[in-house]
Amino acid sequence: MSAVSVVSPAELIHTMGARARAAGYRMARLSTAVKVGALHAMADAIEGAAEYLETENAKDLAGASALTKAAQDRLRLTPKVIASMVKAVREIAALPDPIGALEDVRVRPNGLRIGHMRSPLGVIGIIYESRPNVTADAGALCLMSGNAVILRGGSEAFHSNTALAKLMNDAGAKAGLPPDAIQLVPTTDREAVGAMLKARQFIDVIIPRGGKSLVERVSRESEIPVIKHLDGNCTVYVDEGADLAAAISIVVNSKASRPSACNSAETLLIHRSEADAFLPKVARALLSAGVELRACEASRAIVPAMKPATEEDWYAEYLELILAVKIVDSFEDAVTFINKYGSHHTEAILTRDHARAMEFLGAVDSACVHINASTRFSDGGEYGLGAEIGISTDKLHARGPMGLRELTNAKWVVFGNGQIRE
C-alpha cells in the first residue's frame, strides 16, 4: 500500500521544509525539561502501543519477500526491538542537554571572555531504508539536540514508520513540542527523495542510512551537505601473541551475533605465527555457527574445508553469515590490508602487546578502532550515546556513531563589559 498525495513531491517537501524551518527556531529555544518530558511521553507511547506496532509491521513484512534476509531482519519489529527502542529513547532523555553548553572559554588580555556554545544544526533530513527503529532513534536524538527533522523512510517500512511517527508526534505535541518538530514524508513516491536533496533553503544537512546505492545517489545528487554512512566492511586482526581463547569468542561474536548489522566483521586477519594454532579452532567455531568461510590459499592449506577467496571478497560487505579469512605476515601487513580494503568503519585488534595496540589505534584510518573487543560494540547505544543517527565514515563534520553532540555545532560567543577595539 502506498500513501496518496494530493500535491506533487516537490510541493510537499517545500511545505514540510518551511514548517520544519519554523519549528527548528522554536526547538532551539526549548528548555531541557520540555524536551525530557516529551521524550518520556514518546517512550511511554511506543511501549504502550507494542501490539499495534507489530500489527503495522506485519503489513510491511507481508510485502518484503523480495528483500534479502539481512533487509528483512532489519525491517522486523519484534518485542525485543520495540523494547530496545523504548530503552534508547529513555537513555537519550537521561543524557546531558548539549544545547547552550559553553566550551573552551578563555579570557583575553582586554577582559573579553571568548568561547564556544553548542547549537543545533537546524533542520536535518534523514533518508533511510528498512530499519523502522531509525524513526524512533532519529526523532529522539534530533529532539534532544534541538533540531527539527524530516524523515523519509523506505517504502518497505511505510506502515511501521507511519505508526511510529504518529505515536511520537501525538505524544510530543501533548508535552509541548512544536507540531512540526518531527515530520515523516507521507508518500512512497521516490521523487520525494530528489525533492529533499534540492531543498537547501530549508534543510541544513542530509543523513542517508541504507544500502550503498542509496548513499551513492544521495551523495551524487544532493545540493545540501551530506554526512554519509557507507559500507561496514569491518575487520578483526589476531596479532602475534594474542589470547587465542578469548580471540575465538570475540571473532564469533563479531561475525555471528547479528550478521546483518553494519558493525559485524566481514574479514578476519591472522598473524602467520598464530595461524597453525588458531585457525583450525576458530574455523570450527565459526562453521558451527553457520558461517561460510572464504579464505586465502595459505589459510586453506591449514583448513581445506574453507572456500577460496577472490579479490572481491576482501572488499565485500556481506551482511550475512560469510567471513573472509586471510593470513598476514606482519602487523604492518595487517594495517596496510585494512587501510586498502576496509571501508573505514570499525576494526579490532586482538593482542597482548599494549604498544602494538596503541600503534594500531593511530595507524588504522577508521572511524572506530577497538582493542580486544568485538566490532559489534560499534554502536551509539553501546558507546553511551543512547542511540545513534548513523555511523559516519566521513571525516567532516562527524565520524563514527553520531549522537547528540554530533547533531550540534559550535558558535563563537563573546562576553564583554563595554570593551571597544582600538
Image (tube, grey):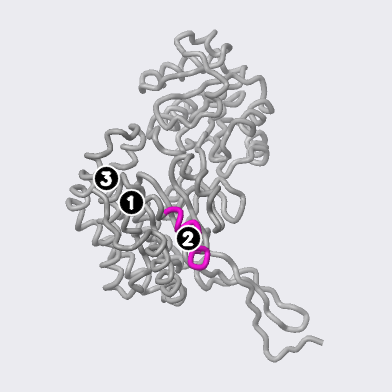
Q: Quadrant of residue 180?
A: bottom left
Q: Is residue 198 left or right of residue 339?
A: left
Do residues under tags 1 and 3 come within 8 Å of each other at their CB atoms?
no
* Whether residue 400 is visible: no
User: Residue 97, position in %: x, y?
Assistant: 46, 68
- Range of magenta residues: 193-203
Do residues under tags 2 and 1 come within 8 Å of each other at their CB atoms?
no
Q: Is residue 319 above or below residue 381?
A: above
The amino acid on which the numbered mark 2 sits, given as a three-letter code, is Leu
Please name the residue that numbered disc 3 is placed on.
77
Q: Residue at x 39, y 50 (%)?
A: 190
User: Residue 292, position in %: x, y?
Assistant: 42, 20
Say which element carries label 3: loop
Q: Residue at x 47, y 61 (%)?
A: 124
Front residue of this view, candidates 382 and 204: 204
State the CA–CA distance, disc 2 to disc 3: 25 Å
Q: Residue at x 61, y 21 (%)?
A: 271
Say which element carries label 2: loop
- Magenta segment includes 152: no
* Whether residue 117 is visible: yes
Please name the residue that numbered disc 1 is placed on.
188
Please name the residue that numbered disc 2 is placed on.
404
